[in-house]
Image (cartoon, coloured by chain):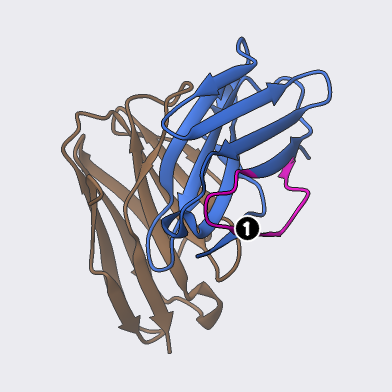
Chain colours: A brown, B blue
Amino acid sequence: DTEVTQTPKHLVMGMTNKKSLKCEQHMGHRAMYWYKQKAKKPPELMFVYSYEKLSINESVPSRFSPECPNSSLLNLHLHALQPEDSALYLCASSQGVDNQPQHFGDGTRLSIL
Amino acid sequence: GESVGLHLPTLSVQEGDNSIINCAYSNSASDYFIWYKQESGKGPQFIIDIRSNMDKRQGQRVTVLLNKTVKHLSLQIAATQPGDSAVYFCAENGWGTSYGKLTFGQGTILTVHP
């Protein structure tokens, strides 16, 4: 079992809905990440948080809004998504951003109708 | 831009054989690499990592080799088992202002036949 927990496991939403993805880790890690993975493709980085501050935003559209309420939690708020946003959204954490292994959750499978 | 890629998209082996998965990287400044295993319906699972000051690192049944001269990385799995069937990704960590930015290769599908 993974030590990074993501909820929900599956989410179906309309283009006008607002929803949030949640990620939690209790390993004492100070860096957390959001990745997007399309079918048969590698994960692509979206956001990096280091010590609860956003350090990298990979030019992600504003309809995706990350939030790091504390060192154990990471949220991804979704609003007005497009069908092409359907994907597996992965959360990861690591002790730090500098050459530390990232540990992934099992993701949220998101479908946009 | 810099990228990490794999030579072979699929690899099919018999149970008990040794498997070798290859990866080429293009950023000569890269100094940290990770191999992940991803099974269907799951997130990437950390297998082993290596820093650029090393040429080889061994884990349980796995060995990673790093050749900085030709910018090549490989993962060797000894006595491959059906449970090793998965997609394997190499990943390269960014540095400086890109610390934490993992760039993944395209992946190799490993299929192990009983």
Quarter residue A103 falls in: top left
Residue at position x 50%, y 59% in the image: B86
Quarter residue A15 falls in: bottom left
Q: Is residue B55 among what the camera can see?
A: yes
Q: Nearer the viewer, residue B27 or B62?
A: B62
Q: Which residues are magenta?
A: B3-19
Image spot of residue A73 (x, y percent): 20, 45
Q: Is residue B90 above or below residue B98?
A: below
State left or right for residue A49 relative to residue A7.
right
Image spot of residue A38 (x, y percent): 55, 68
The tally of labels here is 1
State left or right for residue A68 relative to residue A63.
left
Residue at position x 43%, y 90% in the image: A113
Q: Is residue A60 among what the camera can see?
A: no
Residue at position x 43%, y 51% in the image: B44
Q: Nearer the viewer, residue A28 or A19?
A: A28
The residue singled out by tag 1 in the image is B13
Image spot of residue A44 (x, y percent): 56, 53
State left or right for residue B37 relative to residue A29.
right
Q: Is residue B72 above or below residue B56?
A: below
Q: For numbered disc 1, what is the local secondary structure?
A: strand
